[in-house]
RNA sequence: GGAAGGGUGGCUGAGUGGUUAAAGGCACCUGACUCGAAAUCAGGAGUAGGAGCAAUCCUACCGUGGGUUCAAAUCCCACCCCUUCCGCCA
């Protein structure tokens, strides 16, 4: 959520920044300003009336104490109509506030001024490249071919169980998935100083709103229902990412500045409707309705937000470096960034069988956009204004998504004989150096 | 699902219609005392919104939403959550 005061005071700046997203949101600013003005106008009137009523009520109380009943009754009559007016104006304020909030929740975050202005992923600048495409003396197979031969995945039966877009890991496939999760969590907790959490996989509406998934993208997620009780539908949602529960851990709290920065990492499955998305329904595990991911979340003072983003990105890159997987880092241009983000880096890993890069991580600084939505603040203990409540920066990054990492790993380390070598960093977890039929 | 009890500030805990933003205690901040600290004493300190250049003032907030009243933490209704016991259950 954008700061209404910022919209009020730096209207042109906000309009200009929103326009860089190329989504037309800047057109809603006039409506916001109009509602805001209307709200304040009514507020002034109703608050004056309330002040009067409070004053008179106290006078009545005093008169009653002195047994001056007649005078008290006269004042009662006088204030009775004020009450009716207050009720009416209160309702008006409520209506206007509701409208204002509804529009504000639909407005995306302002891209940071350092982010390149562009329209699509074509415009994303490449930040760096690590390693190189694996050289193979044979034509690389896709992960579908490799894993079916090694009985690591069973696509047909996954479909039987849940339909297309779901994965059934079997044997070494299941063990590899588990090994990767363990490897990632160990890396981030022991080497990168994150606190591991294991959150609920279903969250309420407030969490979805807090991180920016609701209300605008409500059609993208799975809602659940308790048994046959249809009235419970829409109270809980399957998490699309661990970011949803974990970023909301301190929702509605005022943290101490000395508690920051907070680093959390979490493994969870992620559930996505992927309604209308290309690639769902095709074989393989590039785009699916459920995948595993280890997520990194940081809460930090605003001054450190971008420094922490670079470190977070480095933590995610470390995963691919340790696994010896070639990747590149791109920064998303203004037109390609997610709703809540002010700056995003994507990490794309090379998958030889696909002959393309796959996005395995997206690292974003949402600045105070999410903190504002979830009323997460911290009290300053240093600086010019001690004791002031400020919104922290909230960052998130995949460290990393598992399904595509699995694809890249299997396709990169495939051997001509159909087996898959396991990189040294993962061997202690999988307890083998090679998967064979 | 059934029964009982309960949700008040950072924590604890009073308050059952009228100077109550809300006693007391703990924790916290500032000052005094001290070489320093502890103890003691004095004072301060909630969150959000609005008006104002500012000092400051006003409004709302005692789980949430309604209602009664001139006036609600306090009375009434609905809902949510927590605790304990019973039932069911991984």
Image (spheres, rainbow, N blue to C red):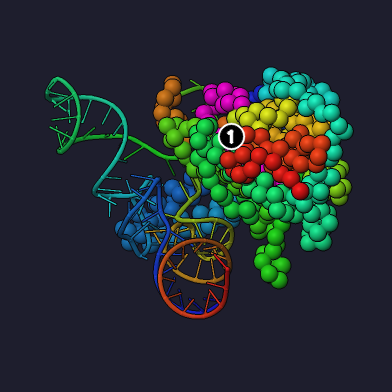
In the rendered image, residue A303 lying in the magenta stretch gets the answer: yes
Residue at 53% across / 46% down in the picture?
Answer: A197
Place of residue A322 in the rendered image (x, y in percent of width and height, measured from the top left): 63, 30
Label 1 CA crowd tier, 10 Å (few <14, some 14–19, many 20+): many
Q: Is residue A124 above or below residue A156?
A: above
Is disc 1 placed on a helix, strand or loop?
Answer: strand
Q: Quadrant of residue B72?
A: bottom left
Q: How many marks?
A: 1
Image point (80%, 26%), residue name = A135
Q: Quadrant for residue A67, please give it.
A: bottom left
Taking depth in this image into account, of A176 and A32 the one nearest to the observer is A176
Q: Which corner quadrant of the image does residue A18 belong to?
A: top right
Q: Which residue is mark 1?
A: A394
Q: Is residue A436 above or below residue A74?
A: above
Q: Residue at x 32, y 59 (%)?
A: A65
Of residues A423 and A394, the one drawn nearer to the viewer in this rendering: A423
């Amino acid at each position: 959520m954008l700061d209404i005061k910022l919209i009020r005071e730096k209207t042109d700046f906000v309009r200009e920044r929103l326009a860089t997203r190329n989504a037309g949101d800047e057109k809603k600013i006039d409506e916001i300003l109009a509602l805001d003005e209307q709200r304040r106008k009514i507020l002034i009137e109703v608050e004056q009336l309330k002040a009067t009523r409070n004053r008179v009520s106290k006078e009545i109380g005093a008169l009653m104490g002195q047994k001056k009943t007649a005078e008290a009754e006269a004042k009662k009559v006088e204030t009775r109509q004020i009450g009716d007016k207050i009720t009416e104006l209160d309702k008006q304020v409520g209506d206007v506030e509701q409208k204002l909030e509804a529009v504000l929740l639909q407005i995306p975050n302002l891209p940071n001024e350092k982010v390149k202005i562009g329209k699509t992923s074509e415009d994303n600048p490449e930040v760096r490249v690590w390693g190189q495409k694996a050289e193979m003396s044979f034509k690389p197979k896709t992960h579908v071919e490799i894993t079916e031969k090694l009985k690591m995945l069973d696509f047909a039966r996954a479909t039987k169980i849940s339909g297309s877009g779901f994965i059934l890991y079997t044997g070494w496939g299941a063990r590899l998935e588990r090994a990767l999760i363990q490897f990632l969590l160990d890396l981030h907790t022991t080497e990168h100083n994150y606190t591991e959490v294991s959150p609920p996989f279903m969250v309420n509406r407030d969490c979805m709103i807090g991180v920016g998934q609701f209300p605008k993208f409500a059609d993208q997620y799975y809602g659940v229902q308790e048994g046959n009780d249809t009235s419970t539908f829409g109270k809980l949602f399957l998490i699309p990412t661990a970011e949803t529960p974990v970023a909301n851990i301190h929702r509605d709290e005022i943290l101490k500045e000395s508690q920051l920065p907070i680093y959390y990492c979490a493994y969870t499955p992620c559930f996505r409707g992927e309604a209308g998305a290309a690639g769902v329904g095709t074989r393989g595990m590039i785009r699916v309705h459920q995948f595993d991911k280890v997520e990194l979340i940081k809460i930090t003072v605003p001054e450190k937000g971008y420094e922490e983003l670079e470190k977070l990105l480095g933590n995610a890159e470390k995963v691919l470096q340790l696994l010896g997987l070639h990747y590149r880092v791109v920064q998303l241009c203004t037109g390609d960034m997610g709703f809540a983000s002010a700056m995003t880096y994507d990490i794309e890993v090379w998958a030889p069988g696909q002959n393309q890069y796959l996005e395995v991580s997206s690292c974003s600084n949402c600045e105070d956009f999410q903190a504002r939505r979830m009323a997460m603040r911290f009290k300053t203990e240093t600086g010019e204004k001690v004791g002031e409540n400020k919104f922290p920066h909230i960052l998130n990054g995949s460290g990393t998504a598992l399904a595509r990492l699995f694809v890249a790993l299997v396709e990169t380390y495939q051997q001509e004989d159909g087996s898959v070598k396991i990189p040294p960093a993962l061997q202690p977890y999988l307890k083998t150096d090679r998967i064979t039929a």
